[in-house]
Image (cartoon, rainbow, N blue to C red):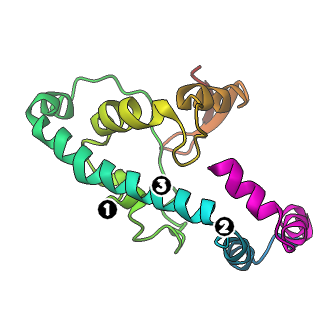
Amino acid sequence: MRSSAKADFENQPEAAELEVRWNDPAENKGWEQKIDSAREVAERSEHYVYERFLQRYVAEEVYLRGVLAVEELREHFQPYLNDAGLPECGRLELDQSISIPEYYKDVEWHLEPEGWDRYDLYGPMFAFVSMSHIFVHGGYAAVGPGDDIVAQRKSVIASLPETVQTAHADASSTESLAVMR
């Protein structure tokens, strides 16, 4: 269905101009307008509209059914949530002087109330619902049909430099950390 939607898009008269504008570094501003223009063209395709409907339906089902299933097993996951003895793998401290962008505030990612960031059972939800019943099949969100999301993510990690720089909480020194592979 995605390939049909893509072909439908490419057959529209505006598609070539949109592609040029999208890839032009001088056109780095006006993202909302570029996205709206592309969406307007894409939504002419029945394939695109149907594919977006299916994406939305699956996302809602993940929440409506998946969260309920994981919540039924909360008592089994709770010991892991309570375990203070887990090794500290690292720390990320955000610069408090940088405000969260407006586009990120109050967004319920994946249609989840308060997004995944605040759901304490996100780990089990992803591992035992999203990953094992949805993402392994591909064809959902950024994962193409038949693609392997784990291989996709490992490929992204493999493309990172061997080391990354990180500032310690006391901001007095930095050290290189090996990227886990």
Disc 3 and disc 1: Cα gap in Å? Answer: 20 Å
Disc 1 and disc 2: Cα gap in Å? 32 Å
Question: Mark 3 or 1 closer to N-term?
Answer: 3
Question: Which residue occupies 49% across, 44% down?
Answer: 170
Give the quadrant of the C terminus. top right
Residue 22 in magenta?
A: yes
Quarter assignment of residue 177: top right
111 left or right, relative to 160: left
Q: Residues within 10 Å of mark 2 (few under 14, many from 20)?
A: some
Type of amino acid under label 2: Ser
Chief SS of the magenta region: helix
Tell me, for residue 93, which label it has, or none. none
- Residue designated by label 1: 114
Toward which corner of the image does residue 175 lie, by quadrant? top right
Q: Are marks 1 and 2 in contact (CB under 8 Å)?
A: no
Q: Amino acid at mark 3?
A: Gln
Q: Residue flagged by tag 1: what amino acid is it?
A: Glu
Q: Are marks 3 and 2 in contact (CB under 8 Å)?
A: no
Q: Position of residue 131 (x, y in %)?
A: 40, 33
Q: Magenta stretch: residue 6 in it? A: yes
Give the residue at mark 2: 45
The residue segment tinted magenta is 1-26
Task: Please give left or right for residue 52 compared with residue 4 in the image.
Answer: left
Q: Residue visible at 42% across and 67% down? A: 107
- Lateral position of residue 150 relative to residue 59, left or right: right
Q: Is residue 168 above or below residue 103?
A: above
Q: Nearer the viewer, mark 1 or mark 2?
A: 2
Q: Is residue 107 left or right of residue 124?
A: right
The reply to whether discs 3 and 1 touch (Cβ–Cβ < 8 Å) is no
Q: Secondary structure at mark 3?
A: helix
What residue would you read off at disc 3? 55
